[in-house]
């Protein structure tokens, strides 16, 4: 398969890059000057048959149309919202992602964000490092155990978060497109009602046209001044200006965010708030999970080019 051209959209996990380099004819798009990309794609359009993208850099219709021999897009991510699935379907291009292998890490991080916000872990760390502890105690934080937790999206990751929160004695409720009859949690068909009935709202759904800005002012106000918002889904799930306003005005107690609408840009006011925990989209970024994700990308590519069933097809 060394002659098969694979286009890597941006720098990714080194193990994945090395394995792609050893198994395929690898092209690294980011190494091309912006002014030369069109020429580069035209020169290699017959060779490139696969594209590897991730949650940050997707594959749009323009790129798809510029690669007439493209057969498969493999996402180094569970999300595929930045891939033009409609155009891929029209052209018969397969699309894969990396589900399941990252579920535990993202769920773990969701719980970590809840604890970090409620127990003020980051401000406490700064308090000790600055020497202020010598002058007096830090003050009080908020308990997590037994708090009602609402989850937006009860898929693999949402279910894993629910299981972990239950271990803290939390009651669980959720909102999703459809009720999950086998899940023992209270279902709300309206996200506003879910927000009204929980103290912690965790966003863990896929990003679609229907879920874009699903957390808006009405939802935030329903969550209220004692509630906290946790987002381990996608940044565009949350109306960021409304979130910033609510935090600045005290209409929301706090937030824990691993994702943002315009990554790596983060709304500047959030940087000044000590009731907000900000992470750089690292939900699945452990050595173990990134190895498993990379292996799944490679397995999908090798299965496709050997005419075998894809391990994790999207289309």
Image (cartoon, grey):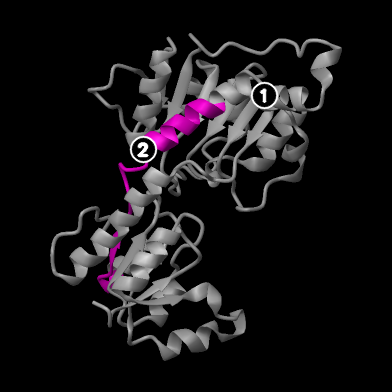
Crowding near pointer 1: few (<14 within 10 Å), some, many (20+)? many
Q: Residue at x 41, y 81 (%)?
A: 66
Say whether residue 23 is left or right of residue 76: left
Q: Residue at x 24, y 23 (%)?
A: 181
In which image quadrant can residue 100 be found?
Answer: top left
Q: 285 or 172: nearer the eye?
A: 285
Label 2 neighbourhood size at 10 Å, few (<14), some (14-19), many (20+)? many
Residue toward you, 7 or 121: 121
Q: Nearer the viewer, residue 129 or 30?
A: 129
SS for callout 2: helix
Q: With respect to residue 269, does 137 lie above or below?
A: above
Quarter of the picture containing the N terminus is bottom left
Residue position marked by numbered label 2 in the rendering: 103
Q: Earlier in the sequence, mark 1 or mark 2?
A: 2
Task: Please identify the residue farthest to the left as the structure is shown.
Answer: 308
Give the magenta range.
90-113
Please determine whether, in this image, residue 1 is positioned above or below residue 194. below
Read off the residue under disc 1.
Answer: 252
Q: Is residue 80 above or below residue 25?
A: above
- Residue 222 visible to the viewer: no
Dot in front, 1 or 2: 2
Where is residue 46? Give x, y as percent.
Answer: 33, 87
Does residue 12 lie above or below 72 as drawn? above
Please report the residue visible at 30 percent of the width from the left and 62 percent of the height from the top. Answer: 95
Q: Residue 174: x percent and y percent?
A: 40, 24
Tell me the quarter of the image containing the C terminus. bottom left
Q: Is residue 110 magenta?
A: yes
Q: Residue at x 40, y 19 (%)?
A: 173
Can residue 55 be spotted in the picture?
A: yes
Give the percent coordinates (x, y) of residue 288.
37, 44
């Amino acid at each position: 398969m060394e002659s098969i051209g694979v286009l890597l959209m941006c720098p990714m996990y080194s193990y994945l890059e090395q394995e792609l380099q050893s198994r395929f004819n690898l092209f690294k798009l980011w190494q091309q000057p912006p002014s030369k990309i069109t020429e580069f794609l035209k020169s290699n359009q017959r060779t490139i048959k696969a594209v590897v993208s991730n949650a940050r850099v997707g594959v749009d219709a323009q790129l798809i149309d510029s690669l007439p021999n493209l057969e498969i897009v493999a996402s180094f991510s569970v999300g595929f919202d930045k891939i033009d699935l409609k155009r891929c379907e029209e052209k018969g291009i397969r699309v894969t992602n990396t589900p399941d292998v990252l579920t535990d890490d993202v769920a773990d991080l969701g719980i970590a964000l809840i604890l970090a916000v409620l127990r003020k872990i980051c401000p406490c760390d700064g308090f000790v490092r600055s020497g202020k502890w010598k002058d007096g105690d830090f003050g009080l934080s908020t308990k997590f155990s037994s708090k009602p937790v609402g989850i937006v999206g009860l898929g693999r990751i949402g279910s894993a978060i629910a299981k972990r929160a239950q271990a803290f004695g939390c009651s669980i409720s959720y909102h999703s497109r459809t009720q999950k009859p086998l899940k023992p949690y209270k279902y709300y068909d309206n996200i506003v009602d879910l927000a009204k009935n929980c103290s912690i709202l965790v966003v863990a759904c896929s990003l679609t046209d229907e879920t874009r800005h699903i957390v808006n002012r009405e939802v935030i106000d329903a969550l209220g001044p004692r509630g906290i918002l946790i987002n381990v889904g996608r940044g565009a799930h949350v109306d960021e200006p409304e979130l910033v306003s609510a935090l600045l005005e005290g209409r929301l107690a706090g937030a824990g965010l691993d994702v943002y609408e315009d990554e790596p840009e983060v709304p500047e006011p959030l940087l000044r708030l000590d009731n907000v925990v900000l992470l750089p989209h690292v939900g699945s970024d452990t050595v173990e999970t990134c190895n498993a994700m990379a292996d799944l990308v490679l397995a999908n590519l090798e299965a496709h080019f050997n005419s075998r069933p894809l391990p994790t097809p999207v289309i």
